[in-house]
Every structure is written in C-alpha cells, then in structure tokens.
Image: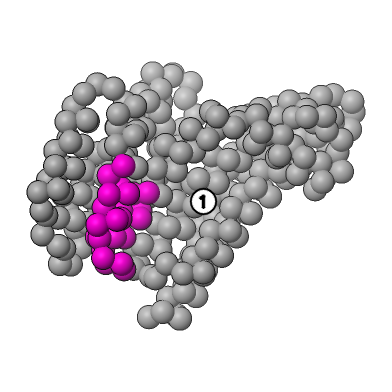
Amino acid sequence: MRPILSVLFVALALNSLSGRIAFFFADANADVTGSLFGLSAIIWFALFGMLKIGLDGQRSREMDRYDWIAVWLSVIIMVIPLKILSVLALPALALYIFWRSASGTPDQRTGILALAITGPAFWGPMTQALLGQEITLLETKLLSLLSSLSTDGNVLHAINGDTLVIAGACSSFANVTLALLLVITLWQMIGLKNDRQLAACIACAVAAVILINSTRLAILGFYPQQFGFWHEGAGRIFFMWGMLAATGLIAIIGVSRAAQRQI
C-alpha cells in the first residue's frame, strides 16, 4: 500500500504546486537563488522524504476496496486539468491515510508527512489569502515591539521619516509553513515518536523564522537608504539562507535529542 500512496502523494503535491513551477519557467527574470524550479528546497526534501518512507521496504498493510477507491479518485482528479482539485485532494487523502493507519506505523508517518506538505501547498496560501491583512498587522506590531520603530497599522515608519508598507510578500508566514514542514520531515524520516519534543522543536523553528524576518524588516527601517540591498538584493538572499540554516539547525538538534531519548 505505502509505495503506491507515496508516489501518489508526491504527484498530488507537484500538481498542487504546478502554478509556481510554471511561473518559474515562464518568467525570464525568475529568482533562482531561493528556489529550485520555483519550489523551496525544503519542499523538494519533503518529497524525497515521502518517497524514502514509502519505498523503505518495511511491511505495509494490504489495501482494501476503500483504499483503492481513494487512490483511483485521486488519479482521476489529477487527470482533470483543474489545479484546485489536486489542492483539495492532497489534504483529503492525507487525512484519510492518517485516520486508517495504525499509530506509529510507517503508513501513518506517510500520512503525517503528506499533511505537513499541505502547509505550503494548501492551508498556507489559503490562510494568507483569507487572513493576510490580519497576519501582516500582527507582524508589524511585533516588529514595533522588537525594534522600537513606530508603526501605523501595517505601515512602518523608518527613522528618516519614510514609510514602508509591510505587505503579504514581506510576511514570514510562508516560511513558517516551511519550517514546520522541515521539522516534521526529519522526524518522520527517522521514525521518531510524535511527542511534546516535536511540538517544542516546531515552536523553536517557527520563532526563529519570525525573529529573522523581523530583523530584516527592522534593518529596512533603520537603514532605509539601503532598501534595495536588503529588500531585493544580496541582503535579502543572506537572510533567506540564514532562515533556512537556522531552521535546519534547530530541526537537526531537536531530532538528535529526541533520537537519543527514544531509540
């Protein structure tokens, strides 16, 4: 069962994210410093983890007729040229597999990882679309508390009097879903139990992402004359890779400590 589902989850995820991949190839000026074919390296790593868990050779339960119905419905959905159907099918199938799999088994780990992939593929963009303004308001208020810069709604007042609008693209929310995905991917690949230590590791990774993004925005406020460098240039790339490195380090430390305790 698991090998079939792993391949199906990867196909559904790529179909759900196909818009980003298409945009990457269509845009001659697409940024290649932070993505591989339009997708974060964390997403590609998670897809690799999905295949690793699915093809690891461990025994999986036999598929029954309900499983086959779910599989064939998913295949039919992918054939229909409507990306939104794959976007919805991915979390639906992931929840189904999680619900029907025994606790702690590789089958259930497949479902958990698929649910984590729905972060950047489904609920992250959905939440950003529905609550984007509220999220940026919260982040702007947090930025004001951390930097002492004055704000008005989602407008940041730089020290020279310039105003900077904190828009959705400046939010750290997209990176929050990636931080969560990276931690869960490592956890499930190693086969660790899902406990409070996992939750603590996720919380630390999310906090690091928000803090690093807030630091970059604060620099824009303190050095507005260098806006291009920190917003679009090498400064942005530096913080982007710093965010990835910090998230990865936290995930590795959390997994290592949990492995010592559980194994």
**Quarter holding residue 162:** top right
Which residue ends up furthest to the right in the rendered image? 160
Q: Is residue 97 left or right of residue 227?
A: left
Q: Position of residue 8 (x, y in %)?
A: 21, 43
x, y percentage for residue 98?
Answer: 30, 55
Q: Residue 260: image x %, image y %? A: 45, 80
Q: Amino acid at mark 1?
A: Ala
Magenta residues, as a range? 92-115
Q: Tell me what residue is drawn at x 27 percent, y 44 percent.
A: 93
Q: Could you tell me which residue is drawn at 24 percent across and 39 percent down?
A: 11
Q: Helix, strand, or loop for circle 1?
A: helix
Position of residue 140 relative to residue 107, above or below, is above
Q: Where 43 falls versus 50 (above or below)? A: above
Where is 147 relative to 263, above or below?
above
Q: How many marks?
A: 1
Query: Residue at the location (10% across, 59% down)?
Result: 62
Q: Main secondary structure of the magenta part?
A: helix
Instruction: Tell me the residue that label 1 is attached to.
Output: 179
99 and 2: which one is in front? 99
Residue 48 can be seen, yes or no: no
How did the renderer colour the structure? Answer: one colour
Residue 49 appears in which quarter of the rendering? bottom left
Say if the magenta span includes residue 245: no
Q: Residues within 10 Å of mark 1 (few under 14, many from 20)?
A: many
Kindly indicate the quadrant of the structure image that contains residue 26: top left
Q: Is residue 95 magenta?
A: yes
- Quadrant containing the C terminus is bottom left
Residue 227 x/y as whole percent: 74, 29
Residue 155 visible in image: yes
Name the residue at 89% across, 25% down.
161
Looking at the image, residue 110 sits to the left or right of residue 38; the answer is: left
Q: In the drawing, does residue 134 fall left or right of residue 194?
A: right
